[in-house]
Amino acid sequence: MGEVRHVGLVVALVLLAIVGLITEPDNFATSSNVVGILALASTIGVITVGMTFVIIGGGIDLSVGALMALASVWATTVATQSYGPWVMALCAILVGAGAGLVNGLLISYGRLVPFIATLAMLVAARGLAQRMSDRKTQLIRPENDAIEALSTTKVLGLPLVVFIFAAVAVAGWVLLNRTTFGRRTFAVGGNPEAARLAGINIRRHTLALYALSGLCCGIAAIIIMARTTTGSSTHGDLYELDAIAAVIIGGTLLTGGRGTLLGSILGVLVFTLITNLFILNGLQTSDQLIAKGVIIVIAVLLQRRGLRTPT
């Protein structure tokens, strides 16, 4: 069933590309537009990798957009920037992973429902980012332009941020499909009690899943800083919805236990392409959100129908 869904997503990408070529033939197929699509997909895509692990493991993470914003703000404070770009990047990763770890502790050992724990983190992280930045956009200093170079330096015609996304996606695929950690993730999401009886430490594994999601948020913060040369409390607004939507239409069950990283990546590309088409055709953001909502509903209905279909 997963392969069929992947083919369906590829067909959807082709159809969207055809729509783009018909409606905006002069702008859609340009190299700059293609690069722009991939750069945008990189930010949301890295977050989606972590979200895929969390949802397959039976959880949900609503805080990913806020964590990315907090990591970008923390990394672009005057104190952090004074240590140079490498410390800025390390700071973003540590802040993201640390906040993800807090999510995991609240859920695994505090026994909070993932929805509530990550919703609380969303609010707290966004508020902390606003407090740290005084609601102002923080610019990356010229001496730290190595961060910006990740977006401006191109290899094979593509910016380095795209290769960062590709590296995270490949690493995530290997971790999910070729390691014990991945097998345990499917087990925990599919049947937690059976996984516990099989000797899997459910709490520790859940903690690791949310820390992994936070780590991906930290990496995404580096990408958004490179693309915008700023750190801002407004970064990542509604990214959690985009990531969850990409995971759902990619075939991952919201109840956990089944899903593919390839499907999630294709889902990211579908939504990014839709966003691009709306922008090129001058359509309103509200219409774009409506279209995404309809796609999510259809994807969930198809999931339920697939589950009821006897194999």
Image (tube, grey):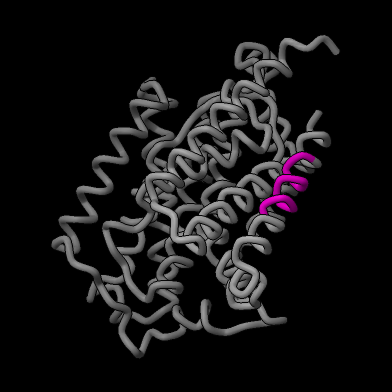
Viewer-nearest residue: 37 or 195: 37
Q: Main secondary structure of the magenta part?
A: helix
State whether residue 265 is above or below residue 106: below
Viewer-nearest residue: 274 or 51: 274
**Which residue, as the protein is rendered here, is positioned at the far bottom?**
143
- In screen coordinates, is 44 left or right of 311? left
Viewer-nearest residue: 28 or 246: 28
Q: Quadrant of residue 233?
A: bottom left
Where does the image place residue 43, in percent across and percent down from the top left?
51, 59
Give the residue drawn at x 82%, y 9%.
310
Q: Is residue 132 visible in this depiction of the protein?
A: yes
Q: Quadrant of residue 22?
A: bottom right
- In screen coordinates, is 219 left or right of 234? right
Give the residue drawn at x 49%, y 44%.
242
The residues colored magenta run: 8-16
Q: Quadrant of residue 218?
A: bottom left
State whether residue 41 is above or below residue 250: below
Where does the image place residue 277, in percent across and percent down from the top left?
55, 58
Q: Is residue 200 visible in this depiction of the protein?
A: no
Q: Can residue 126 be found in the magenta stretch?
A: no
State whether residue 282 is above or below residue 140: above
Where does the image place residue 184, in percent across and percent down from the top left?
68, 29
Give the residue drawn at x 38%, y 65%.
91
Give the residue drawn at x 63%, y 53%.
269
Where does the image place residue 179, in percent across and percent down from the top left?
75, 41
